[in-house]
């Protein structure tokens, strides 16, 4: 990958140890940028629409009944086959 192009990551997880571990690993990778860490799903749709992360890491424990519908409402997921 071209080193000038960074992959943007957003994390939704309330486990501070996990988040700090991911941030530590990502800090070692020059082509990775963490956009934001959120502790819940409350603003995830607005965040994804505003920032278009390349990778979205979601905690399994934070998944709510409407998670699939929420993800399918995002343009980046709607274009998947």
Image (tube, grey):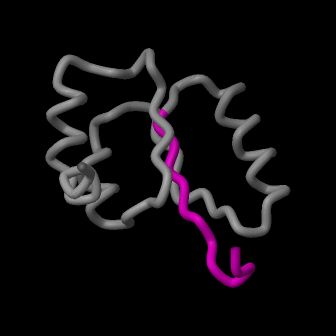
State the image quarter where residue 53 is shown.
Answer: bottom left
Q: Which residues are magenta?
A: 1-12
Q: Is residue 52 left or right of residue 9?
A: left
> Which residue is at the front of the view, 62 or 4?
4
> Which residue is at the front of the view, 41 or 76?
76
Residue that appears at 38% across and 66% down? 51
> Residue 31, how many percent across, how many down?
71, 68
Residue that appears at 28% across and 58% down? 76
> Residue 3, how many percent across, how many down?
74, 79
> Residue 19, how many percent across, how many down?
65, 35
Residue that appears at 79% across and 46% down? 25
Residue 8 within the segment the image draws in magenta: yes
Q: Is residue 41 left or right of residue 13?
A: left
State the image quarter where residue 15 is shown.
Answer: top right
> Which residue is at the front of the view, 9 or 36?
9
Q: Is residue 49 left or right of residue 21?
A: left
> Residue 70, how many percent across, how many down?
19, 38
78 w.r.t. 7: above or below: above
Q: Residue furthest right?
A: 28
Residue 55 within the segment the image draws in magenta: no
3 w.r.t. 56: above or below: below
Residue that appears at 60% across and 57% down? 34
Q: Is residue 10 left or right of residue 30?
A: left
State the image quarter where residue 58 is shown.
Answer: top left
């Amino acid at each position: 990958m071209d080193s000038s192009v960074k992959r943007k990551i957003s994390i939704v997880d309330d486990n501070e140890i996990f988040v700090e571990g991911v941030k530590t690993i990502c800090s070692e990778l020059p082509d990775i940028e963490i956009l934001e860490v959120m502790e819940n799903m409350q603003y995830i749709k607005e965040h994804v629409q505003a920032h278009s992360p390349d990778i979205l890491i979601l905690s399994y424990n934070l998944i709510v009944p409407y998670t699939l519908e929420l993800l399918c409402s995002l343009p980046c997921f709607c274009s998947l086959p």
